[in-house]
Amino acid sequence: MRLDGKVAVVTGAARGIGLGIAEAFLREGASVLLADLDEGAVAETASRLEATSPGRVAPVAVDVSSQPDCARMIGAAVERFGALDILVCNAGIVRQASPIEDIAPETWERVLGVNLMGCVYPTQVFAPLAKARGSGRIIYMASVAGEVGGVSAEMTYSVSKAGVLCLTKAVARQLAPHGITVNAIAPGAIETAMTDVLQYDASVMRSIPLGRYGEADDIAAAALYLASDDAKYVTGSTLDVNGGLFMR
């Protein structure tokens, strides 16, 4: 029970990678606030998880591109569970690649708002709480697209995830003196409902040395490591989980 007694917030938790992370945290003893834009889906997910983790699951509908919404989310976790130890910023949106001249300003604003500011805003609210306690874990969801410039994904996604990679280092440096670790996970080609829009072709599979697409559980295992005391001396790092698709 590596997270016994801990409290976590996971954004984008109604399905996919976020759900996989929430399930892994619950199995290891944590209480989890499930946050998602889709109010119906997150409530349904929480109801299902409550059956096996009674009293340790709660849902909240949140637009992570809104700072007031993020403040409400963090407040809901503290009110419901009495504390907050782990923040996982996983919510994201992706679009299929298109020429830069065809990308509307509102698309840039929305994708950057969710994928990048959806990490900044929750951190701004969580940081003072974690500083006061002298401990905390922050995990951002980056992407291989932010490391290589993207292939299937639109550049709005790649740019936003590159921002997350830099944010990880900047926040880690600032919060380390307070006992707070900040790390990122950079998934490769993961099979989820969100990435269905990318329509991976055979060339992507041929580029993966391990010969398969990743699953939500692969990312959840990495998040569990970073959230636990196993990673207490790890901060400012990006953990690549991509089957060898990209090697540093």
Image (tube, rainbow, N blue to C red):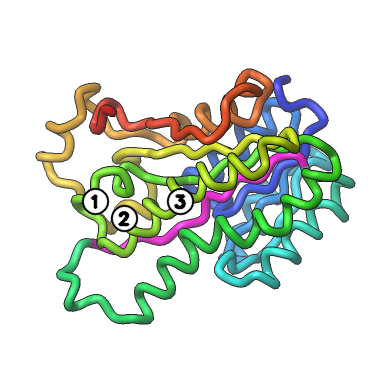
**Does label 1 or label 2 sit earlier along the sequence?**
1
Q: Residue at x 62, y 51 (%)?
A: 45
Q: Outermost residue toward the bottom?
A: 105
The one of 195 and 228 positioned closer to us in this rendering = 228
Q: Which residue is disc 2 drawn over?
A: 158
Q: Work out how far the residue at label 3 is from the one at label 1, CA to CA, in angstroms.
A: 14 Å
**Does label 3 or label 1 sit earlier along the sequence?**
1
Q: Is residue 3 magenta?
A: no
- Image location (x, y in percent) of residue 189: 29, 40
Q: Which residue is disc 1 drawn over?
A: 150
**Within-10-Å neighbours for mark 3: few <14, some 14–19, many 20+:** many
Q: Is residue 52 visible?
A: no
**Within-10-Å neighbours for mark 1: few <14, some 14–19, many 20+:** some
- Quarter of the image for residue 124 reads bottom right
Q: Work out how far the residue at label 2 is from the one at label 3, CA to CA, in angstroms.
A: 10 Å
The one of 48 and 130 positioned closer to us in this rendering = 130
Between marks 3 and 1 in the image, the one whose residue lies nearer the viewer: 3
- Image location (x, y in percent) of residue 135: 77, 35
- Image location (x, y in percent) of residue 113: 48, 68
The N terminus, quarter of image? top right
Q: Which residue is disc 3 drawn over?
A: 164
Q: Are marks 1 and 2 in contact (CB under 8 Å)?
A: yes
In magenta, the rendered stretch is 85-96
- Image location (x, y in percent) of residue 77: 79, 52
Dot 2 lies on which element? helix
Q: Amino acid at mark 3?
A: Val
Q: Is residue 62 visible?
A: yes
Q: Residue at x 43, y 73 (%)?
A: 110
